[in-house]
Image (cartoon, rainbow, N blue to C red):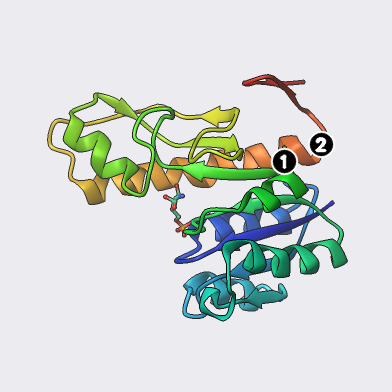
Amino acid sequence: MNIAVLCSGNGSNLQAIIDKTADGYIPAKIAVVVSDNKTAFALKRAEKAGIETLVLNPKDFASREAFDKEIIKDLRKRKIELVVLAGYMRLLSDHFIKEYGNRIMNIHPSLLPSFKGTHGVRDALEYGVKVTGPTVHFVDEKLDHGPIILQKAIDVKDDDTEEGLLERVHKEEHKIYPEAIKLFAEGRLKINGRRVVIK
Ligand code: GRF
């Protein structure tokens, strides 16, 4: 199974997925890493692993849809069956979501539906929750909203800082994202409305 990973930044989740495809835990191939940011460190990780990259500048396109269509053209050529968002900071157009319906995953650093948006860890800490942690979910047309695949709860410590908590959340992300992709690649995820059942 060919997968595409879309990244805008550091790419630590991409690295976890690279490592877990290389050692055979995930029975799939990362056929391409796509980025909207030519300076993303994720691209260096891809190159080091010998994975092809596609870099597009949103400023070169008239609309979100035109940008996404260019990506889709490439993904079709590569026969991509799963699109993995890993720190990809752009909203997908409806066009993209229709094309890859129920075949796009995202990871978010809070227990959804709490603390959607770009600062999931900071917002959870400031709110004072005692438990937080990452969520892997399928992507639908609403932000951080689609059916939940896996979540991992982490205790928040009284003296936690954003950096410390973020580090522990990331550590768990690097376990549950490869696990979710493995389950998908093995055909073990069944979507039933909002519920995802693992077979
Ligand atoms: C992760 O915390 C993920 O939950 C969020 O963006 C961050 C990406 O980190 N969607 P990285 O680029 O994988 O290191």
| Picture coordinates of residue 198, whole percent (x, y) | 71, 22
**Residue lying at 50% horizontally and 29% vertically, measured from the top left:** 151
Residue assigned mark 2: 186
Cα separation, mark 2 vs mark 1, equals 6 Å
> Could one spot residue 32 in this view of the protein?
no
Q: Amino acid at mark 2?
A: Glu
On screen, residue 171 versus residue 142, left or right, reads left
| Picture coordinates of residue 156, whole percent (x, y) | 25, 30
> Could one spot residue 76 in this view of the protein?
yes
Q: Quadrant of the C terminus?
A: top right
Examine the rendered structure and indicate whether residue 90 appears above or below residue 151: below
**Residue lying at 77% horizontally and 49% vertically, measured from the top left:** 99
Q: Neighbour class for label 2 at 10 Å: few (<14), some, many (≥20)?
A: some
Q: CB of mark 2 within 8 Å of CB of mark 1?
A: yes
Q: Residue furthest left?
A: 159
| Picture coordinates of residue 188, whole percent (x, y) | 78, 28
Front residue of 120/25: it is 120
**Label ID, residue 25:** none
Examine the rendered structure and indicate whether residue 31 appears above or below residue 181: below
Numbered circles on residues, count: 2
Res. 153 image quadrant? top left
On screen, residue 8 versus residue 6, left or right, reads left
**Dot 1: element:** helix
**Label ID, residue 182:** 1
Front residue of 147/177: it is 147
| Picture coordinates of residue 121, whole percent (x, y) | 30, 42
Q: Residue furthest front?
A: 62
Q: Amino acid at mark 1?
A: Lys
Q: Neighbour class for label 1 at 10 Å: few (<14), some, many (≥20)?
A: many
Res. 16 image quadrant? bottom right
On screen, residue 119 versus residue 37, left or right, reads left
**Residue lying at 64% horizontally and 48% vertically, measured from the top left:** 94
